[in-house]
Amino acid sequence: MAFPLPTLLPTIEELLQEVQWLDGLILITDSQRATFVSFSQVDPLLRRLRQRPKGPEVAEKLCMSLLESHGKGAAKPVLVFQGDGSFWLGVMGPAGANPHRHHAIAHLHRCLALKD
């Protein structure tokens, strides 16, 4: 599944640049604002997630993603979690880490423009 909020990609990339040396994840909720959650703040987040619809499933997948990305540099898990339980979970790194990202983003914008 493609990233559901392509308009937030530039903001996420900026945030990834700022926190590239820290362990944690990028979280986007209904506010549609990207925030960094440090590794030390993950437990309270997981507890809150488990109380939501589909929360236990999301929490389990997020834990696996955090374990896989821990200590691997600037790439971080990105979780888009909506109040109705729908979610998107992936791993993103700063734009410089993937030279094909801008082409993929432009393609995604074209596809979404055709959809409208």
Image (spheres, helix red, strand yellow):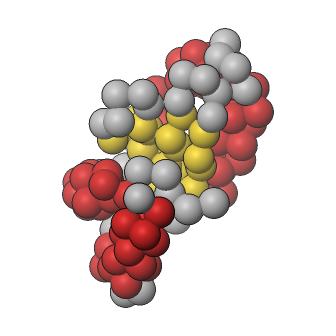
Q: Residue at x 59, y 47 (%)?
A: 88
Q: Residue at x 37, y 66 (%)?
A: 113
Nearer-the-camera pick, 116 or 47: 116
Q: Position of residue 89 (x, y in %)?
A: 59, 49
Q: Position of residue 33 (x, y in %)?
A: 31, 36
Q: Residue at x 31, y 55 (%)?
A: 7
Nearer-the-camera pick, 64 or 49: 49
Q: Quadrant of residue 27?
A: top left
Q: Is residue 91 toward the left or the right of residue 100 in the image? A: right
| Residue with the most extreme top position | 51
Nearer-the-camera pick, 20 or 90: 90
Give above or below for 104 relative to 65: below
Give above or below for 111 relative to 83: below
Q: Position of residue 50 (x, y in %)?
A: 68, 19
> In which quadrant is the N terminus drawn?
bottom right
> In which quadrant is the C terminus drawn?
bottom left
Q: Residue at x 65, y 17 (%)?
A: 52
